[in-house]
Amino acid sequence: MVSLPEELQAREAAARQRVDELQAEAAELAVRLEKARADLSRLEITRETVAQVLAELSAAQAAPEAGARDAPDPKAPAPHGIGVMAVPPWREGLVVQVLPDVYRDIVEIVADAPGPLQAKQIVPRIGLEATTAKIEGTRGKLKRLVERGWLDEEAPGRFTLARHDGDADQVNSR
């Protein structure tokens, strides 16, 4: 007959082995998750780059053609969304209303903040649930706004309104 202490020791050893197996499994899943996030990031950047290049090519081709004809051809197909830049680069005189709604909301929230904000602080303020997916999506939008000159990233992950020379108050001209 097995004694109670020996039985408890055997069960403890089995439980410890299961914990070790689950920890190894969790570590493997964490590595796979990080790789999937990196793949997603590369695909998003590629899509944005392709859209930007197509927009630039389209604009370059349209410029010489625009001078050649005065009125648009009514039989020409309507332009579609491919190659259209949703977030235009900031330039003097451009107001926040030119941005898509969610980008405008983000810029206004950052402008109203007393200091730099992180993506996880912005997500609930734009009406989204604070999940990892929503935070990462918002972080991508913040980075895009930085690339286009609307925001600055003073420290990694901390965003403020971009200050431009002679910029009176671009956001409050709503």
Image (cartoon, rainbow, N blue to C red):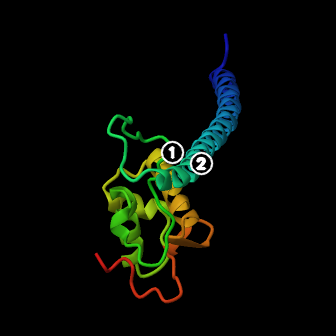
Residue furthest toward the top? 1
Considering only order in the chain, which callout, 1 or 2, is on the residue closer to the N terminus? 2
Mark 2 vs mark 1: in front: 2
Residue topped by disc 2: 57
Residue type pointed to by label 1: Gly
Quadrant, the C terminus:
bottom left
Q: Are marks 2 and 1 in contact (CB under 8 Å)?
A: yes
Residue type pointed to by label 2: Leu
Which residue is at the front of the view, 44 or 47?
47
Residue topped by disc 1: 83
Which residue is at the front of the view, 77 or 103?
77
- Which of the labelled discs sits on residue 122, or is there none? none
Quadrant, the N terminus:
top right
Measured as percent of width and height from the top left, residue 28 is found at 70, 32
Determine whether 50 is above or below 113 in the image. Answer: above
Determine whether 102 is above or below 109 in the image. Answer: above
Which residue is at the front of the view, 13 or 94?
94
Q: Residue at x 69, y 27 (%)?
A: 21
Local packing at callout 1 (Cα closer than 10 Å; few below 14, some 14-19, many 20+) is: some
Q: Residue at x 57, y 48 (%)?
A: 61
Determine whether 87 is above or below 42 in the image. Answer: below
Local packing at callout 2 (Cα closer than 10 Å; few below 14, some 14-19, many 20+) is: few
Determine whether 21 is above or below 171 in the image. Answer: above
Q: Residue at x 36, y 38 (%)?
A: 78
Q: Could you tell whether 110 is left or right of 45 in the image?
A: left
Which residue is at the front of the view, 107 or 155?
107
- Secondary element under disc 1, as helix, strand or loop, is loop
Q: Could you tell whether 21 is left or right of 68 in the image?
A: right
Measured as percent of width and height from the top left, residue 83 is found at 51, 45
Q: CA distance from mark 2 to mark 1?
A: 9 Å
